Image (tube, rainbow, N blue to C red):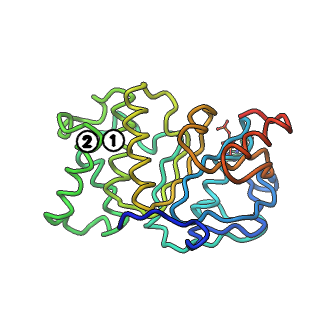
Amino acid sequence: MTALTPTLQAQPADLVLNHVSLGYGETVIVRDVHGKFTEGTMTAIVGPNGAGKSTLLKGLLGLLRPLRGTVESRHPRSALGYLAQASEIEPQFPVRVEDFVAVGLWARIGGLRAVGRTLARRVDEAIVAVGLQDQASHWIGELSGGQFQRMRFARLLAQDPSVILLDEPFSGVDEPTVLTLLQLIHAWHAQGRTVIAVLHDRQLVRTHFPQTLVLAERVLAWGDTRSALDAQELVGARA
Ligand SMILES: Nc1ncnc2c1ncn2[C@@H]1O[C@H](COP(=O)(O)OP(=O)(O)OP(=O)(O)O)[C@@H](O)[C@H]1O
């Protein structure tokens, strides 16, 4: 992707929600969300525990079909990068770091195709970008918690998605790793990619995320971070 400084109003919407309600079975968890995520924006989703933040991400990704309303994506699923809250893989699974990261390519090339030299280089670069070059051939079970999260970010880098959805990416992660991962997120943003992250740390949101969506079953506020968090405080819903 080319670097750009987006004039947000002029950018197309990557994801559009039309009065979307989401839930499980008969139970509605997220109600009547209406709005859009514009290309190149960097949005935090905050709200109390159980507010439906992870559920909203799953709706945006198409992993959960809306109970009401529609979600429109400008991109195929393969161009949406997703970091789930819990790891999607058991840490003791016998796979090496470089192979785990290479799975990020599958979304784009298909799992059974040979990885050519250019793509193999992309995996190497992703591993270096997160500082795991010395662990590339290690089993994933040998990594610390912070290294494991760096590896999951490297897989997203290898995937090269246009829109990145992160569910509590810093939870349980050491401070140096948080700084490294924040740098990667800012680099994605500077490249014009769209970033959406569920976060709990309000100070981190204020410092790093220009846009915020406050969710407590419904959207309480959605806009520039300062106004959204101020509105949240007014209605008394703490992140
Ligand atoms: N697969 C599921 N089946 C049934 N209920 C679910 C499922 N996943 C989540 N829920 C329920 O939906 C509600 C919202 O969960 P969700 O994880 O979306 O909230 P959240 O805002 O991300 O919470 P937290 O900040 O605690 O991670 C919770 O009551 C949860 O128990």
Neighbour tally class for label 1: few under 14, some 14-19, many 20 plus, Cα within 10 Å: many
Q: Amino acid at mark 1?
A: Met
Q: Position of residue 117 (x, y in %)?
A: 13, 63
Which residue is at 76% across, 39% downward? 230
Could you say where residue 173 lies in the image, as x and y percent from the top left? Answer: 45, 28
Q: Nearer the viewer, residue 227 or 51?
A: 227
Element class at badge 1: helix
83 w.r.t. 18: above or below: above
Closest to the observer, 209 or 156: 209
Asked if residue 60 is positioned above or below residue 12 in the image, the reply reads above
Does label 2 or label 1 sit earlier along the sequence? Answer: 2
Which of the labelled discs sits on residue 97, or is there none? 2
- The C terminus lies in which quarter of the figure? top right
* Ligand 1 located in image quadrant: top right
Q: Are marks 2 and 1 in contact (CB under 8 Å)?
A: yes
Left or right of 176 in this view: 29: right
Query: Residue at position x 30%, y 47% from top?
Result: 100
Q: Position of residue 65 (x, y in %)?
A: 67, 65
For disc 1, the marked residue is 151
Residue 213 sits above or below residue 159 on the image: above
The CB of the residue at mark 1 lies under 8 Å from ligand 1: no
Front-most of 168 and 12?
Answer: 12
Q: Residue at x 69, y 50 (%)?
A: 213
Relative to residue 18, is residue 155 depicted above or below?
above
Q: Residue at x 38, y 46 (%)?
A: 184
Describe the element under mark 2 as helix, strand or loop: helix
Measure the C-alpha gap from mark 2 to mark 1.
7 Å
